[in-house]
């Protein structure tokens, strides 16, 4: 029996050695994976920075932000500070839109729609809050009005024009029902702005100087309720207004399109939103401080700077995406971007600024003066007539662009009478 035992010992010893080698191999793999953990995190971070910062060509304008800050402290050249701040905020506004889109991939269509409603006009909101803090109520009113005019005439006009040129052999078709809903909301916003202005200029207030503010605050609360109802209607009751159109188009036309795949993770999206919002907030302070000095340095009315130049920055992302989708014959999405953004500003952002001003003790109201209110009313009518057929072509786009040029020229020769009236 002894030889057998020896033989068994001799047979089992290589197995024991192999087991020991196996455990050592597993242990070495675990140590390697632990060492790869930080490396993977570092590479993921570098990839995220590359995608958000270096991949987009518009980010070549990012250095103008720090340059504006340096000029602010070293010189008194307010015109250059304003111009460089404007250039520095433009890529940040575009990247904010990108980070919101990436976050919407993880949240689903309902929360994604709410995020787009909140962050879609984050740049305008931040600039408006800074201007309100400095008591520049007219700059707030005119910049928000300018954003509506820019979206409805310039952005939508360029989308119709570029889409019509690419698809010149046919009229592009869009969802007329969505356009009617948005047109109704825009007309409601015009009504909310008209009554305080008429009340002021007809001198028919019960308490002069107070009634229009009280009416504006009441109307703002009503408009916010209407916008909340619109969001519920859009996202819950009637899914087929914007979101499903986008989803169906992506499934049918661009199944393999990289837009359908998130490029950064959930927490990276949230982190980038926080970083970009903070950076926009910092630059907005310098931008707002330089407006008056820039007006004098460039010999331009503050009204022209507020209504025409400031909205170009905030609408950079909308402008690019609306044109891109129109050229891909996805006109419903272009309409959602341009008209949807105007609806957000008129029914959410303007009333929101009135409520925020109320909390700050600022007399922010809906009296945008007769010239601005009439401009908005005519613009809404023109766009509503353009949208009533449910078709678009390059000529309609050209007409909208030319209308915007008339509006821009009007504000270039317009002197704000608000101070004299008060």
Image (cartoon, helix red, strand yellow):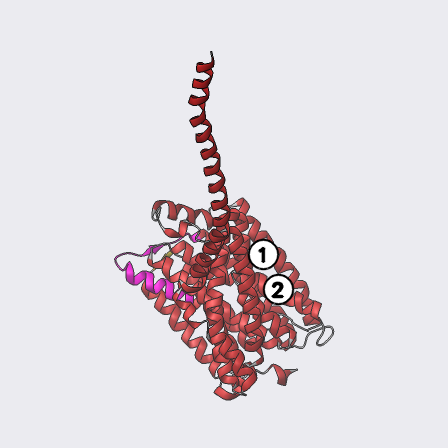
Q: Quick one: 110 or 166, which is closer to the camera?
A: 110
Residue 384: which quarter of the image? Answer: bottom left
Magenta segment, which residues?
A: 155-176
Q: Name the residue beneath numbered marker 2.
A: 351
Measured as percent of width and height from the top left, residue 320 is found at 40, 64
Measured as percent of width and height from the top left, residue 238 is found at 51, 46
**Left or right for 136, reference 379:** right
Q: Residue furthest top?
A: 1
Q: Name the residue beneath numbered marker 1.
A: 227
Measured as percent of width and height from the top left, residue 422 is found at 66, 82
The 10 Å Cα crowd at callout 1, few under 14, some 14 to 19, many 20 or more, is: some
Q: Quick one: 63 or 218, which is closer to the camera?
A: 63
Q: Residue furthest right?
A: 207
Q: Mark 1–mark 2 contact, CB under 8 Å?
A: yes
Visible residue check, residue 89: yes
Question: Is 160 inside the magenta-drawn segment?
Answer: yes
Visible residue check, residue 308: no
Q: Quick one: 385 or 295, which is closer to the camera?
A: 295
**Left or right for 259, reference 33:** left
Residue 252: which quarter of the image? Answer: top left
**Left or right for 105, reference 135:** left
Q: Work out how far the residue at label 1 is from the one at label 2, CA to CA, in angstroms.
A: 10 Å
Question: Is 292 inside the magenta-drawn segment?
Answer: no
Kind of element beneath mark 2: helix
Q: Quick one: 80 or 33, which is closer to the camera?
A: 33
Q: Is residue 242 above or below residue 158?
A: above
């Amino acid at each position: 029996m002894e030889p057998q035992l020896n033989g068994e010992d001799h047979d089992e010893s290589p197995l024991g050695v192999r087991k020991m080698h196996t455990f050592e191999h597993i242990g070495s793999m675990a140590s390697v994976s632990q060492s790869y953990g930080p490396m993977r995190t570092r590479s993921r971070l570098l990839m995220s920075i590359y995608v958000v910062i270096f991949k987009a060509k518009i980010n070549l304008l990012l250095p103008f932000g720090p340059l504006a800050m340096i000029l602010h402290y070293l010189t008194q050249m307010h015109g250059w500070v304003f111009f460089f701040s404007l250039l520095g905020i433009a890529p940040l506004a575009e990247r904010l839109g990108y980070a919101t889109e990436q976050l919407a991939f993880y949240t689903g269509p309902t929360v994604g729609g709410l995020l787009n409603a909140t962050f879609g006009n984050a740049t305008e909101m931040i600039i408006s809050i800074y201007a309100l803090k400095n008591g520049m109520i007219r700059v707030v009113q005119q910049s928000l009005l300018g954003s509506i005019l820019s979206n409805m005439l310039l952005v939508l006009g360029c989308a119709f024009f570029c889409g019509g040129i690419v698809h010149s052999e046919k009229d592009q078709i869009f969802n007329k029902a969505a356009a009617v809903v948005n047109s109704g909301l825009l007309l409601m916003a015009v009504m909310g702005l008209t009554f305080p202005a008429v009340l002021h200029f007809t001198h028919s207030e019960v308490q002069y100087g107070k009634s229009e503010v009280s009416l504006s605050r009441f109307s703002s609360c009503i408009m916010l309720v209407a916008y909340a109802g619109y969001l519920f209607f859009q996202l819950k009751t009637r899914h087929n207004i914007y979101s499903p159109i986008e989803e169906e188009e992506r499934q049918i036309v661009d199944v393999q399109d990289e837009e359908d795949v998130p490029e950064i993770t959930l927490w990276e999206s949230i982190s980038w939103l926080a970083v970009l919002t903070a950076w926009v907030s910092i630059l907005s302070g310098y931008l707002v401080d330089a407006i008056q000095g820039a007006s004098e340095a460039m010999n331009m009315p503050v009204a022209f700077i507020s209504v025409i130049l400031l909205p170009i920055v905030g609408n950079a992302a909308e402008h690019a995406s609306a044109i891109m989708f129109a050229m891909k014959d996805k006109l419903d999405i272009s309409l959602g971007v341009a008209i949807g953004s105007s609806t957000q500003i008129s029914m959410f952002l303007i009333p929101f600024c009135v409520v925020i001003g109320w909390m700050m003790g600022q007399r922010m109201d809906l009296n945008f003066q007769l010239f601005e209110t009439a401009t908005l009313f005519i613009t809404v009518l023109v766009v509503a007539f353009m949208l009533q057929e449910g078709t678009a072509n390059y000529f309609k786009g050209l007409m909208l662009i030319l209308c915007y040029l008339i509006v821009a020229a009007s504000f270039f020769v317009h002197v704000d009478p608000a101070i004299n009236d008060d």
